[in-house]
């Protein structure tokens, strides 16, 4: 971090409308830290060159009072919603800022609109939608009599414009990009003939389909129904907007008003057993262990003698530590491992699913002088392994 530096490339100057979009639409999704980071980077850009100077990375974190982890998370959120792209060359980072989407683009984006509604609730979402809406002007009876360029100007001879300089142009954010393949060819196979035209499915439309399938969990069959309803040859220019509209209607038809929940991956993904080391497991499951050094030595021998997935090894350790205060000897560990292997549990996902089975509530036997005493629920496998470990075989 000490030797790392950065510079910023801008894509335009933020207008008042852009500032409102960032504050009211993007900020509820990315948080105040990411919002502040975007504005700070924008302020570093020279409005004449649309580039900044090169700064040490520590300057950025000190100025915003951000720790390294918080800075990384804030940067990631900006990248995820299409407001920033990161490039690296050795120890120099280039941050390319994209302008925010227009409110219309934001609300029609396959993910951003749904994400915003899930974060702030439907009532607040409707308020924001109205905030960025204007009444449509009634043009009935009016005829467009605007002159075209060639009706006003006569072209004699034009020199082509050439320059080695970069011409400034506003670069809007691309919205959310979904890094998954929805099998366009397979979708084509089930579409009616009138929709089997690849010219219809531009990159923008393909991105919209991927986003919608991701948000609503649609199958290819679901998506087919949406596209059939959305495509109208007479209104093909608004196919993009209609896909989003009919996707929402289709979802509500089959799922009612059930809200779409979107959260950060780190907050919702399950932990991987293979990511934990023995010290972590001992600290969590057996904090009062009398001889952890001996236990770690036993685990090392256990790992050396058994060439299996680390996740399965850790599952064995967890099973034993949930039954005994101290880690059993090597013979017992291998006995538990063999039992898991006999059950066909050879991978980390299988081991995790097995040890996380829903616990069975158990109660102690009633006596004439006490009320029923509740005991913490235990997994259904615990009795089996408890008997195994106490058998002495």
Image (cartoon, rainbow, N blue to C red):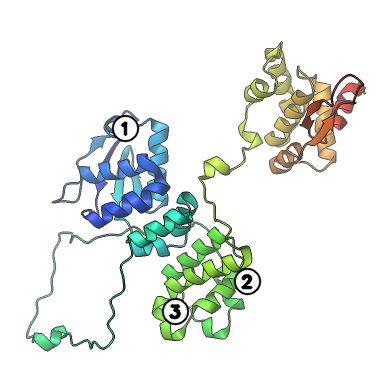
Q: Which mark is residue 61?
A: 1
- Side (left or right) of 295 relative to 104: right
Which residue is nearer to you in this view: 370 or 68? 370
Q: Residue at x 23, y 54 (%)?
A: 16
Q: Position of residue 392 (x, y in %)?
A: 91, 21
Q: Could you tell me how far apart the alpha carbons at marks 2 and 1 are, in whole angstroms?
A: 48 Å
Who comes first in sequence, dot 3 or dot 2? 3
Q: Is residue 175 visible?
A: no
Q: Is residue 188 above or below residue 162?
A: below
Q: Position of residue 114 (x, y in %)?
A: 48, 58
Q: Could you tell me how far apart the alpha carbons at marks 1 and 3 are, in whole angstroms?
A: 47 Å
Q: Nearer the viewer, mark 1 or mark 3?
A: 1
Q: Quick one: label 3, few (<14), some, or many (20+) residues within 10 Å?
A: few
Residue at the far top: name it.
290
Q: Which mark is residue 199?
A: 3
Q: Residue at x 69, y 43 (%)?
A: 349
- Disc 2 designates what residue? 221
Which quadrant holds residue 36? top left
Q: Quick one: label 2, few (<14), some, or many (20+) residues within 10 Å?
A: few
């Amino acid at each position: 971090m000490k030797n790392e530096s950065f510079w910023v490339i801008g894509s335009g100057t933020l207008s008042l409308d852009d500032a409102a979009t960032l504050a009211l639409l993007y900020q509820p999704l990315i948080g105040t830290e990411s919002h502040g980071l975007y504005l700070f980077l924008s302020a570093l850009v020279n409005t004449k060159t649309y580039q900044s100077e090169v700064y040490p990375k520590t300057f950025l974190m000190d100025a915003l009072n951000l720790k390294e982890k918080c800075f990384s998370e804030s940067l990631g959120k900006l990248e995820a919603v299409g407001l920033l792209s990161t490039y690296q060359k050795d120890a120099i980072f280039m941050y390319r800022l994209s302008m925010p989407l227009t409110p219309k683009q934001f609300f029609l984006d396959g993910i951003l609109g749904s994400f915003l509604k899930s974060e702030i609730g439907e009532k607040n979402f409707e308020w924001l939608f109205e905030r960025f809406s204007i009444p449509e002007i009634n043009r009935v009876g009016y005829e467009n009599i605007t002159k075209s360029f060639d009706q006003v100007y006569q072209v004699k001879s034009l020199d082509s414009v050439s320059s080695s300089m970069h011409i400034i142009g506003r670069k809007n954010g691309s919205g959310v990009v979904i890094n998954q393949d929805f099998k366009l060819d397979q979708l084509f196979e089930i579409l009616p003939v009138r929709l089997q035209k690849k010219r219809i499915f531009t990159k923008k439309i393909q991105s919209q389909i991927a986003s919608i399938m991701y948000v609503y969990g649609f199958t290819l069959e679901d998506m087919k129904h949406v596209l059939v309803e959305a495509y109208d040859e007479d209104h093909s220019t608004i196919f993009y907007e209609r896909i989003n509209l009919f996707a929402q209607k289709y979802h509500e038809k089959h799922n009612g008003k059930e809200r779409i929940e979107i959260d950060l991956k780190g907050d919702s993904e399950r932990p991987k057993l293979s990511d934990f080391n023995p010290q972590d497991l001992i600290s969590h499951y057996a904090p009062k262990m009398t001889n952890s050094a001996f236990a770690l030595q036993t685990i090392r021998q256990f790992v050396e003698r058994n060439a299996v997935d680390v996740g399965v090894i850790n599952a064995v350790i967890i099973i034993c530590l949930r039954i005994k205060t101290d880690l059993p000897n090597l013979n017992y560990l291998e006995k538990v491992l063999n039992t898991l292997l006999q059950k066909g549990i050879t991978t980390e996902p299988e081991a995790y699913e097995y040890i996380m089975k829903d616990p069975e509530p158990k109660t102690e036997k009633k006596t004439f002088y006490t009320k029923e005493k509740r005991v913490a629920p235990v997994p259904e496998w615990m009795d089996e392994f408890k008997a195994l470990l106490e058998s002495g075989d």
